[in-house]
Image (cartoon, coloured by chain):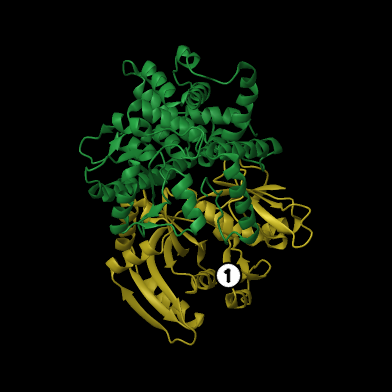
Amino acid sequence: MSTHPAADCALLLRGLHEALEIPEARWDRVLRLARMTGLHGRLAAANADNPTVSERVRRHLLSATRMADFSARMLDAELRDVAPLCGGDFPVIALKGGAYALQALGFARGRFVSDIDLLVPARALRTMEARLHAAGWESAALDPYDERYYRDWSHETPPLRFPGHFLELDLHHAITPVTGRRHFDPAPLFDESLPIAGSRFRVLSARDQVLHACVHCFQDGDLALRVREIADIDGLLRSFAGTTGFWPGLVERANALGLGRPLWYGLHFARSWMQTPVPQEVLSALPGPAAVLRRPMEAYISLALLPPDPDRPPGLSVRFARRLALARYHLLRMPLHMLLPHLARKAWLRTRRRTPDGANENAGGGP
Amino acid sequence: MQRSIDLGAASVVVRSPLREFNAQLDLLYRDHSQAGDSGFADVRVALLPGPPWRVWGPQVRLWSEASCPFDPYPLDSALPLFEWGTNWLLAQRLNAHVLLHAGVVAREDRALILPAAPGSGKSTLTCALHLAGWRFLSDEFGVLDTESGLLHPLLKPAALKNRSIDIIGGQPGAVLGPVFAGTRKGDVAHFAPDRASVAARRRPVTPALVVFPRYREGAALRCEPVRRAEAAMRLGLNSFNYRKLGPVGFDAILRLARTAPAWEIEYGALADALPCIEQLFGKAS
């Protein structure tokens, strides 16, 4: 009965835009892949009124919708609580999920949010952090090494949380790690940022939002299961591409900020997996990988980003692709002379620390 | 081997090569499991032995959607891992309903809800009422339908702990799985609901009475009404997803508290508690 995961994944991605008419056993697979990739809320948003689904499938979609509603309420509440701390003396830019919700973009419906990302100028970072602390937000307790990792090598503060709140707050002063190869001065991002009517938060310009999503997808973390990020890129492009001059402006900006390569990847995979309307001349104008490398790259990225067969433990090829992705992630984050001692320290700590009881979710991209 | 288990409000497909574990499932799910795949399942898990080179202290892992969400258990404890793990997974996915943390039993499609914190004697009481002739709906999840206001059965075995194992296991007609000594929650054994309850697993029931039990060793029986507003608050607090459901959960809990009168009983012996509950149930109509 089992169908190929790639075919089911294609179905899932189609289901983010349109109501699916598929048999119940196929829904079983699509729902599982949706949960694995965190896309079940968006799948439910597009299929909420789908009259062809069975009662059991409807219940799963309803469950996802309710959890997404919860996530949206928590996001709303957190932004409302942080807003009074934005005094207007420096810009506070909401990134990613927060920004999509503030702009009421279509694809924000059903999109799960696990944290709030705010971008402030580097000079204002301490001020904003102090205001949050004074208002009751607490920084995760870190040892001096991890503290230094965040302060000196990363592009964000250690996560902040208000006791009892569901969402974490990450304060950024750049959108790329400061020690990384693709680091650039974020000043132009602030210059082009836009106000949101009736809110104290600003958002990145449309083209910068696309660039940030691409950077986040391909540069900023472990690649495993990041198909959700491609769905974001697709959502942003479908929301903004109608504006005149959008495409040339996007390419120009990517080249100016040195982000042509991640943009090429983002556009390529959005088009290839989600049929996002991306003009060919846009892709041709960007520095993509060499032609001979494209086929192996395509296979490797698909293995790392797309969900594997949910019915069995991930095979060797998937595990290898993920290991490779992790290695690449680390190399992009810091040069080898810093990376090797950092990883050695992590490995040494791992042998001493046993994971606590209970659910051990996959460790993310933290220190 | 692979089997499908129809729990009523949800279905589980489980696959495992472990012979002993399969024999335990045969016993505990004897009336509602069948070989093969039902085509659609709310939860799909595989319980697979850990890496073969781990000769000292072999382990079992629960696989769900190509990953292991929980730490491994000792190889002979596949059943507790399966029960605990599927409960956790069900709680993630059944948010179309309010999931009360409660035992539910019924007479003639009218439900008695026993919400309680762990250690209050909820499982023991649920099993004792079942052995006294009540229909078993669930021990862990009170599945409250937010649309109809009815309760759905979720026929998982009750997890009995420590002394309850002997108290319930010693009663005529009780079917228990093996005792797993020294788990995180102490000794655990699983109690299988009877065939009639399993056969009725698709028939929802109307909430009729809420009883907050509190077991205290040597306590004399005490039984007091709980005001509706307080009952609503306590039902909400004893739920897995009340907070996440927001207004939907609030409305469903209020509706429940308005329909079903609530009592609190403190007891030191089942022989005191059962007649008291029977009497309260008779009066609630």
A225 or B111: nearer the viewer: A225
In which image quadrant can residue A132 be found?
Answer: bottom left
Question: Of all residues shown, which one is farthest toward the front?
Answer: A337
State left or right for residue A260 relative to residue A298.
left
The residue nearer to you, when weighing B64 against B122, is B64
Residue at the image position 60 percent from the left and 34 percent from the top: A304
Q: Is residue B218 above or below residue A264?
A: below
> Which residue lies under the disc numbered 1?
B185
Looking at the image, the residue that sits furthest to the left is A198
Figure disc tally: 1
| x 61%, y 50%: residue | B68
Residue, x 46% and y 47% (percent of image)?
A152
Q: Estimate the x, y position of residue B82 in percent, counting from the top left.
A: 62, 56
Going by the picture, which residue comes out furthest to the top?
A281
Q: Quadrant of the N terminus of chain A?
A: top right
Shown colour of chain B: yellow
Vertical position of residue B268 compared to residue B114: above or below:
below
Q: Position of residue A275 (x, y in %)?
A: 48, 21
Disc 1 crowd, CA 10 A, few/some/many (<14, 14-19, 20+): few
Please give the name of the residue rendered at 35% of the width and 23% of the height, measured from the top-left corner: A240
Q: Position of residue A159 (x, y in %)?
A: 42, 51
Percent coordinates x, y for residue A346 in the rendering: 60, 52
Q: Identify whether A324 is placed above or below A345.
A: above
Chain letter belonging to callout 1: B
> Which quadrant of the structure image shows residue A120?
top left
Query: Along the line of sight, which residue is nearer the eye, A345 or B79?
Result: A345
- Secondary structure under tag 1 reads loop
Q: Given the image, on which type of amino acid does mark 1 rest? A: Lys
Query: In this structure image, what is the colour of chain A?
Result: green
Q: Is residue A53 visible?
A: no
